[in-house]
Image (cartoon, helix red, strand yellow):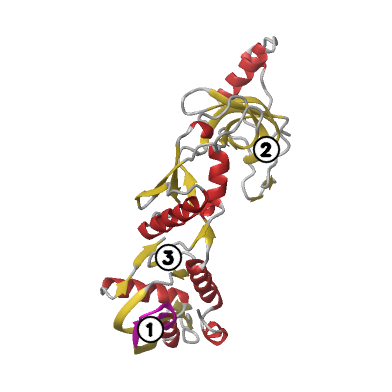
Amino acid sequence: MMSALQCRLVPALFCILILLWSAVAIAQVRIKDIVGLQGARENQLLGYGLVVGLNGSGDSLRNSPFTEASLKSMLDQLGIGRSANDFRTKNIAAVLVTAKLPSFANKGTQIDVNISSIGDASSLRGGTLIFTPLFGGDGEIYASAQGGLIVSGFSAEGDATAVSSSNPTAARIPNGGIVEAPAPGNLNNEDFLILQLANPDFNTAVAITDRINEFTSEVYHRALATEVDNQSVVVDIPEKISATRFYASLGKLTIAPDTPAKIIVDERTGTVIIGSHVKVSTVAITHGGLTVSITEIPQASQPLPFSDGVTVIESNTQIIIGEDGGSVGIVEGPDLQQLVNGLNMMGAKPTGIIAILQGIKSAGALQAELVVQ
């Protein structure tokens, strides 16, 4: 771990990210927080619906024929027959409705739904989603949605200008969906559990297996877990206990997961995250910044008195080139602390550290995976 003095020497954000990564690497975590149960996954739902009650910010029916057709179909179902030429409203918008069906969700469970405009509506603020069935990947209806929309964005415009914030054509309805058919699968009908690691790793899979076997040997007098590969562990369910209760007891067990030697680089924000197991072979580094300054100083050329000449503007460009830094430093990183100290002694900023790390990786001296986002 880094001392307080060393933290002050490193850029604040860079130091915080390093400390967080190091802390995670040695922390004891619950098994339930690093694994998932195979088969216990969310299911994507999708539906097509109409939002009504918009204050003139809905679809223009002539430019969105599907909205006009949907409106006519809805009114026909309600027994209100109208000619297509009678529609002039801009208070309605066609939308796609998406939601996630939680694993083992029962009939009547409330879920959140997201709404996105697919026409030329300018805003969904103040609108209400009318009854919309939500379909699963198999074409069956699993939920329905309806309710008032919550829109975080806004837009306003005048004759000469317009202003907007976030996205006013996307909205959300918390608990706006109701499950109509239970999600497939029943945990208590299973004879064994398959635990899937969120971050596949052989050492972590073995650690989970050993910890579960330690627990089951003490409680059930036999080992019940077997590692399959780097991302799954199979655990037999003992007799006379429900799968739900057994999985809950396993989830409370804690282990220290292994972390890979990895460096995450985000070039857009200048963020660098270095794992605690990163090693760097001895390497010499020079890093400097080239600055090019271009200045335009136009000058006026005046004609001589009593001449027929005219005043002209002549260009005058000054270019100044300078280079900062450029000193050569030796960096050897048998551990994270020395690597950070070496980069900091060179005065490297986050953007410079990104370039240095990429160069070290190309030279074959970085003993870690470099992920550039």
Distance (Cα) linking label 1 and label 3: 23 Å
Q: Which residue is mark 1?
A: 288
Q: Which residue is mark 2?
A: 173
Q: Which amino acid type corresponds to the residue marked 2 in the rendered image? A: Ile
Is 113 colored magenta in this rendering? no
Answer few, some or many: residues within 10 Å of disc 1's Cα (few below 14, many 20 plus, some between 14 and 19): some
Which residue sits furthest front? 221
Q: Which mark is residue 264?
A: 3
For the residue labelled by badge 1, is the local secondary structure a helix, a strand or a loop?
strand
In the foreground, 313 or 230: 230
Question: Percent from the top left, x then y, of residue 264?
Answer: 42, 65
Q: What is the quadrant of the C terminus in the image?
A: bottom left
Residue 123 seen from this side: no
* Range drawn in magenta: 330-339
Query: In the figure, residue 292 lies in which quadrant?
Result: bottom left
* 3 or 2: tag closer to the N-terminus: 2
- Label 2 environment density (alpha carbons within 10 Å; few <14, some 14–19, many ≥20): many
- Name the amino acid, label 1: Gly
